[in-house]
Image (cartoon, rainbow, N blue to C red):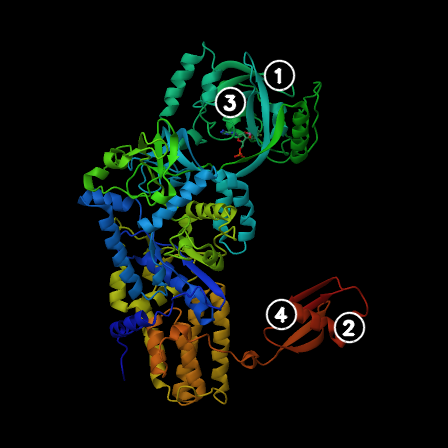
Amino acid sequence: TATYDVAAVQDKWLPVWDELQPFRADDDSPREKKYALTMFPYPSGDLHMGHAEVTALHDVIARYWWQRGYEVMNPMGWDSFGLPAENAAIRNDEHPATYTYANIETQYESFKRYGISFDWTRRLHTSDPEYYRWTQWLFLKFRERGLAYRKNSPVNWCPNDQTVLANEQVVDGHCERCGAQVTKRELTQWYFKITEYAQELLDDLDRLEATWPTRVVTAQRNWIGRSEGAHVSFAISGREEPVTVYTTRPDTIFGTTFMVVAVDSALADELVTDAQRPAFEAYREEIRKETEIERLSTDRPKTGVDLGVTATNPVTGTQIPVWATDYVLADYGTGAVMGVPGGDQRDWEFATVMGLEIIRTTQTPEGFDGEAFHGEGPAINSPAPGVDAPLDINGLGVAEAKRATIDFLEQQGTGQGAVNFRLRDWLLSRQRYWGVPIPVIHCEKDGEVAVPYDQLPLTLPELRGADLKPKGVSPLAAASEWVDVECPTCGGPAKRDSDTMDTFVDSSWYFLRYCSPSYDEGPFDVAKANAWMPADIYVGGVEHAVLHLLYARFFTKVLADMGMLETREPFAAQLNQGFVINRGKKMSKSLGNGVSLGDQLAEFGVDAVRLTLVFAGPPEDDIDWADVSPAGSLRFLQRAWRLSGDVTSAAGTPAEGGDVALRRVTARTVHDAAELVESYRFNVMVARVMELVNATRKAIDSGAGPADPAVREAAEAVAILLSLVAPYTAEEMWERLGHQPTVARAGWPAVDPALLVEESVTAVVQIQGKVKARLEVAPDISEADLEQLALADPGVVKAIDGRPVRKVIVRAPKLVNVVV
Ligand code: ANZ
């Protein structure tokens, strides 16, 4: 018997597919469009197991859509600016482009061989001037809309990468890229005003909930962090202007026994009295050495300094002390907090350490023996017994008490209901070379001047090796020939902005560029983008739950407001794959448990590796390479392939009249496979194909025989279903079954619905637990249909005898229990 030569089959089909280009998406096709998007890689090294997994999973969906008759756009490109290339360039004394484009070529060849159905005519690289020209264009448009601006503020600084980081790039106080502890610096930097879209970014998550992974939606909600409360003004002794605090609990105003201000805020510096200044400055020096995690840590003793002034509680008129502390953050809310030890644990600890008064304003539940209480309960001490105050909220629940307090403050003119977001504006400047130059010129006379649109792209100067060493300012600042320019407005001497953009800017719109990748009148052809967008599926890693996905959503909304996009959300549905691990652990050099994709492909072939990744389990789960069997996958593929050689009926033979039992299995498998793919249960789909292979083998060897047309029908179905996962094997089978390439566009097998109706099953109808009727029903009857049938049955109607039905319990297809 012939053997299945994996390498030969790969070598055979690759050039044929290259020639046929079966996955080229036609913008003008009359078919319904589907946009299958997967996260594009950084070009660092060759592809690894992670890439192999995510693209194998993603390809199941893209290839399925082609088979179902859609026009599918499945593009791929490279997120090719960024630090790895720059660091490699410093190490190797070369230009970052060398490393970048060499790796892109390597990955491109690997992707091709790996057989993913990408439309390579749409390939893009974010580091190409043709691409970043439009990143610069978008930046300038955002700036015109007031959505890109510069400000001076304390920023996150990575001392290792020598660059600032967005809040989103700081993970537990460390640089998300290199792991170094992040410090703070005061710098003037560019920001995108993503906060302007905070409410919409939050609201639209409600609609994404049905089609996005829950953990992504939750992570975004938490990151945006909306809270509702009030701004409350406190008059300050010896100062004209009051200080406003932000609180989520205005109802606790009667329990406010002090005010705390962020020690590193301008406000604290302004408020402190001369007498307290030395103590204040000493304390501030101490705090400046701390990291944000230390500051927010709940298990450190609270610290602070009395600023020497007092504030007046607007409701009670009480004078309270004003302190500076590190547990209040300068850039959240107003940087000042009304201290309520009874309701906030940090305030409780602070009051305890400093000897400040504690007044509970919410009734604690029976047996409560904790400290601060922030649960539900009626307001108490609001005002305290015997105290005369213009507001009385005693007895009200938290929500009513909040509302009543806000109403009062608003009438009194000392406060206002307010909404606050945790989300900050997106800091986008980076002090690195290998990124998009910010197209702005700074002129002493004219200030910030945009580089004229007709001068875009503003390309990077040629720097290499040691020129790129991090020095705290961008390497571009030292490239004087590039940096020193004439002001476009006055012609006088001016300097280019020497920072480059965060690479997340590049990836916030690449999915739009794919829709018209060589368009040169704008970032994308509006009509084409509207025809393809939103992407119907976005497959990628959950590590992007916040950063990339939030930024891309923000860009989409701004572009919609610019009239360039109809959709306000870029990704209609999303799937996150798990990790490929080995022996229970993440693959890493130090553990020596890495699995080389190249080795696996060489040993078992592309299809066996792809099949293994898809078959291992639900896509969201981690895959432990120690628990799976690419050798077993290969054996299965050989079994499937062998079927195609055994079929003896001619191609085109109608299957009618063939073995009905096998035809039923085929029909059921094809029918279920569609549902399984659409619900991302790819592993179950593969299992079903395996069963179909077994059934076909049995029919050939000991049943209908190789000439039965049902056998051909089954083998062809196997080839088409396998084309979603194992394209080489499927193509080879298809050819051996007498067809022209490519199986990838053969079309989904037609299913005769009559073959899906199985013999009926008996459903029992009980009333008060007693059997009153038996019904013959289809095995896949729905609960609703079964209930309706049961209640309409004459025997059942008679037994109910007009009594009201209190409850119907349906267990389709076997049981209906009626309670009257
Ligand atoms: C009084 C109060 C009483 C508070 C109470 C809570 C409970 P979220 O929900 O995250 O928005 N806060 C306000 N600004 C702050 C800052 N810059 N740094 C640290 N804490 C700050 O949190 C809002 C609450 O966090 C506010 O409500 C304030 O404390 C505190 F029983 O005010 B609250």
The residue that mark 3 highlights is 260
> How far apart are the alpha carbons under marks 4 and 3?
61 Å
Sequence-wise, the earlier of marks 1 and 4 is 1
The residue carrying pointer 2 sits among few (fewer than 14), some (14 to 19) or many (20 or more) residues within 10 Å by Cα, namely: some
Task: Provide the secondary structure element on which disc 4 rests.
Answer: loop
Residue 797's label in the rendered image is: 2
- Residue 469, percent from left and from top: 23, 37
> How far apart are the alpha carbons under marks 1 and 3?
16 Å
- Disc nearest the viewer among 2 and 4: 4
Q: Mark 1 belongs to which amino acid?
A: Thr
The residue that mark 4 highlights is 782
- Residue 183, percent from left and from top: 35, 31
Q: Is residue 471 left or right of residue 572?
A: left
Sequence-wise, the earlier of marks 1 and 2 is 1
The residue that mark 1 highlights is 318
Question: Relative to 100, does residue 275 appear above or below in the rendering?
Answer: above
> How far apart are the alpha carbons under marks 2 and 4?
21 Å
Quarter occupied by the N terminus: bottom left
Sequence-wise, the earlier of marks 4 and 3 is 3
Task: Provide the secondary structure element on which disc 1 rests.
Answer: loop
> How far apart are the alpha carbons under marks 1 and 2?
74 Å
Q: Mark 4 belongs to which amino acid?
A: Ser
Q: Mark 2 belongs to which amino acid?
A: Val
Q: Quadrant of ligand 1?
A: top right
- Disc nearest the viewer among 2 and 3: 3
The residue carrying pointer 4 sits among few (fewer than 14), some (14 to 19) or many (20 or more) residues within 10 Å by Cα, namely: some
Outermost residue, top side: 275
> How far apart are the alpha carbons under marks 2 and 3?
72 Å
Outermost residue, left side: 93
Along the line of sight, the residue nearer the viewer: 727 or 813: 727
Residue at 32% in and 29% down: 492
